[in-house]
Amino acid sequence: MIKEIIVVEGRDDTVAIRRAVEADTIETGGSAINQRILKRIALAQERRGVIVLTDPDHAGERIRKIIANKVPGCKHAFIPEADATRKGDIGVENASPEAIRHALARVHTSYEGAPSLIDWEDLIAAGLIVHPQAAARRMEMGNLLGIGYCNGKQFHKRLSVFQITREEFSTALAQIEREGL
């Protein structure tokens, strides 16, 4: 049984979570997250802790940002888009139990206002911004670090918020370079 309550978007996500692990969930009802749901999430965070596990798409990221802004200190788990896509449909409900367990094993707690351990120049040098393959490199790096895919500015923020160390960053960078990306 996972102690924290997992926040997902809908009922099908809850079914997928329960196929993978024993856990309680809160469903946001999709991107129309309201104050009532945010209050439930805040109470869950206070009592048991929360893990946000939304779809790896624009709507899922929007929900994740809303929750992070309104309920500080939540943990975040990310499923790579490739592991959450079936027949062109992207969502947690499409992920295998193994992919869900892998994501939950690599949760990160957000620390807003945390000092950045990786600076903007590191991202440029790593080819994660201002590079012809920057988007593909960020996607792979985000998957390796367990922080998901996003644009360069948001990627830099996630590195800080999730306190990714220089060692973690360097190890992931070495791996994507070995893979020729």
Image: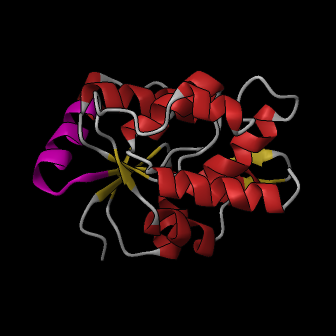
Residue lying furthest left: 47
**Who's the residue at 80% across and 40% down the image?**
136
Query: Is 178 placed above or below 159 here?
Result: below
| Residue 181 belongs to the span the image colors magenta | no
**Who's the residue at 59% across and 54% down the image?**
170
The image position of residue 10, as x and y in percent, is 50, 46
Query: Is 104 placed above or below 64 here?
Result: below
Q: Describe residue 161's horizontal placement relative to residue 120 as left or right.
A: left
The reply to whether residue 111 is visible in this rendering is yes
**Who's the residue at 56% across and 26% down the image?**
120
The image position of residue 52, as x and y in percent, is 40, 47
Dividing the image into 4 quarters, which one contains the N terminus?
bottom left
**First to last magenta residue range:** 38-50
The image position of residue 77, as x and y in percent, is 46, 53
The image position of residue 49, as x and y in percent, is 21, 54
**Who's the residue at 41% across and 39% down the image?**
117
The reply to whether residue 79 is visible in this rendering is no
Between residues 181 and 139, which one lies in front from this camera angle?
Answer: 181
Between residues 59 and 11, which one lies in front from this camera angle?
Answer: 59
Q: Describe residue 82's horizontal placement relative to residue 171 as left or right.
A: right
Query: Is 135 placed above or below 75 here?
Result: above
Query: Is 33 placed above or below 117 here?
Result: above
Q: Describe residue 94's horizontal placement relative to residue 25 as left or right.
A: right
Between residues 84 and 26, which one lies in front from this camera angle?
Answer: 84
Name the magenta segment's main secondary structure: helix
| Residue 48 belongs to the span the image colors magenta | yes
Figure coloring: secondary structure
Total marks placed: 0
